Image (cartoon, helix red, strand yellow):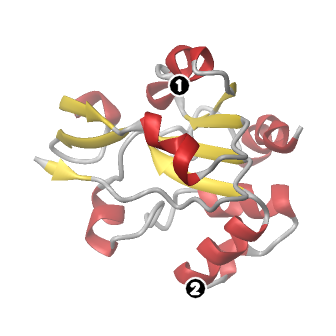
Amino acid sequence: MLIGFPPVVAADTHTLILGSFPGEASLAATQYYAHPRNQFWRLLGVELDDPLAELAYEERLRRVLSHGIGVWDVLAACHREGSLDAAIRNAQPNDFASLREHAPKLRKVCFNGKTAGRFAPVIGEAGYTTLVLPSSSPANAMLSFDQKLRLWRDILT
């Protein structure tokens, strides 16, 4: 069983971006979105006008939190060979009920990709605004960086 990461949230987090589950590179580095071709930090950095992709990991997290943005995954644990979402088995969701305790100002939950986006109805029923974004994963090569960015711009609206 693979175990994911704790949430990166603060009391003033208003927007949370949820991935599905960390890939192999992220698990090995113990960092969200550690694969060098994953566009997450670049997309979010352009959106926030902050050079996140150029910063050390701990500074990235600090800066994201300073913008009121949090990062987490929909799954707490799963079995998976490789990094593809399609290979996820025996998935165990994270404890979303605890979000209100850790991030009382949370209003919007964005999903990084369709797999994570399957949880949008459940999160929406809990009273949050939801947005399913195109995946920042290198496996999502159907859209260019600029096409993804146009859709990621809705994070802050």
Q: Is residue 80 visible?
A: yes
Q: CA distance from mark 1 to mark 2?
A: 28 Å
How busy is the neighbourhood of tag 2: few (under 14 within 10 Å), some, or many (20 plus)?
few
Q: Quadrant of the C terminus?
A: top right
**Could you say where residue 128 lies in the image, as x and y percent from the top left?**
67, 27
Return the disc, 1 or 2, that comes first in the chain's sequence: 2
Q: Residue at x 66, y 46 (%)?
A: 104
Residue 89 drawn above or below residue 19:
above
SS state under label 2: loop
Q: Residue at x 36, y 63 (%)?
A: 26
Write down the residue under mark 1: 117
Residue 47 drawn above or below residue 149:
below
User: Left or right: where does residue 90 sit relative to residue 115?
Assistant: left
Q: Residue at x 66, y 73 (%)?
A: 53
User: Left or right: where does residue 146 sit relative to residue 41?
Assistant: right
Residue 65 drawn above or below residue 80:
below
Amino acid at pointer 1: Gly
Residue 56's disc number: 2
**Could you say where residue 52 lies in the image, as x and y percent from the top left?**
70, 73
Task: Report if the CB atoms under discs 1 and 2 are less than 8 Å apart.
Answer: no
Q: Residue at x 37, y 38 (%)?
A: 95
User: Left or right: where does residue 62 sit relative to residue 49?
Assistant: left
Amino acid at pointer 2: Ala
Give the camera-side residue of 41 and 142. 41
How busy is the neighbourhood of tag 1: few (under 14 within 10 Å), some, or many (20 plus)?
many
**Could you say where residue 144 lies in the image, as x and y percent from the top left?**
70, 42
Q: Quadrant of residue 151?
A: top right
Q: Is residue 138 visible?
A: no
Q: Quadrant of residue 24?
A: bottom left
